[in-house]
Amino acid sequence: MWFNYVLESAILANVLAQLIKVPICLITKRKWNPALVFSTGGMPSSHSAFVAALTTAIALVDGIGSTTFAISFCLASVVIYDAMGVRRHAGQHAKMLNQLLDDLVKTGNFSIFQDESYQKRFKELLGHEPLETFCGTLFGIFIAITYGILVGIV
């Protein structure tokens, strides 16, 4: 695997995006949450960073006229759209379902929910806001170019 600049750029962007979620959360929300390193969602989108770095690195190595760039660009478009579309809405649905469960328990109208299998909470942080995907995309491009300069590709 080593030395594959394209793959290394994508992995590096993904790992760094996950790592910087913790200090960003600390700065913006005044909350220390190291579990963010291993979670989905949050600022920046590591999914967007991953595919943006992959696509940028391919553009730098093979050129924007290459078939590999076209494939990577299409893949990146789907991943980024999914991160801020379908996955974000699934997270919003989870939040509403969790609130509904809480409300039913508070009011005592939860006869069906006495079974523990109905009391499972859903994960709410699944997708990304558009700003998080935008920042992740820019971060991935930045990492691919910077790493390319460091290893002499650019």
Image: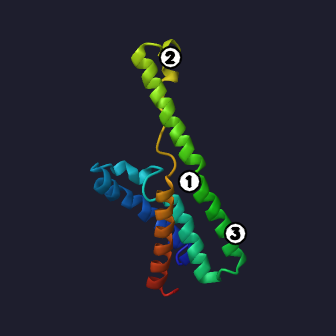
Disc with the residue nearer the chain's start (2 vs 3): 3
What amino acid type should be assigned to the residue bearing mark 1? Ala
Front-most of residues 70 and 134: 134
What amino acid type should be assigned to the residue bearing mark 3? Ile
Residue at disc 1, secondary structure: helix
Label 3 to label 1, Cα distance in Å? 18 Å
What amino acid type should be assigned to the residue bearing mark 2? Asp
Q: Are marks 1 and 2 in contact (CB under 8 Å)?
A: no
Disc with the residue nearer the chain's start (3 vs 1): 3
Q: Is residue 85 left or right of residue 21?
A: right
In percent of width and height, residue 20 lies at 37, 61
Q: Nearer the viewer, mark 3 or mark 1?
A: 1
Front-most of residues 104 and 116: 104
Front-most of residues 44 and 9: 44
Label 2 to label 3, Cα distance in Å? 48 Å
Task: Tell me which residue sits at (65%, 69%) in the image.
Answer: 72
Residue at disc 2, secondary structure: loop
Crowd tier of the residue under label 1, counting other residues whose Cα lies within 10 Å: few below 14, some 14–19, many 20 or above = many
In percent of width and height, residue 1 lies at 56, 72
Task: Tell me which residue sits at (46%, 73%) in the image.
Answer: 143
- The residue beneath circle 1 is 83
- The residue beneath circle 3 is 71
Residue 37 quadrant: bottom left
- The residue beneath circle 2 is 115
- Decide if residue 4 is in sight here: no
Farthest residue to the front: give it.
130
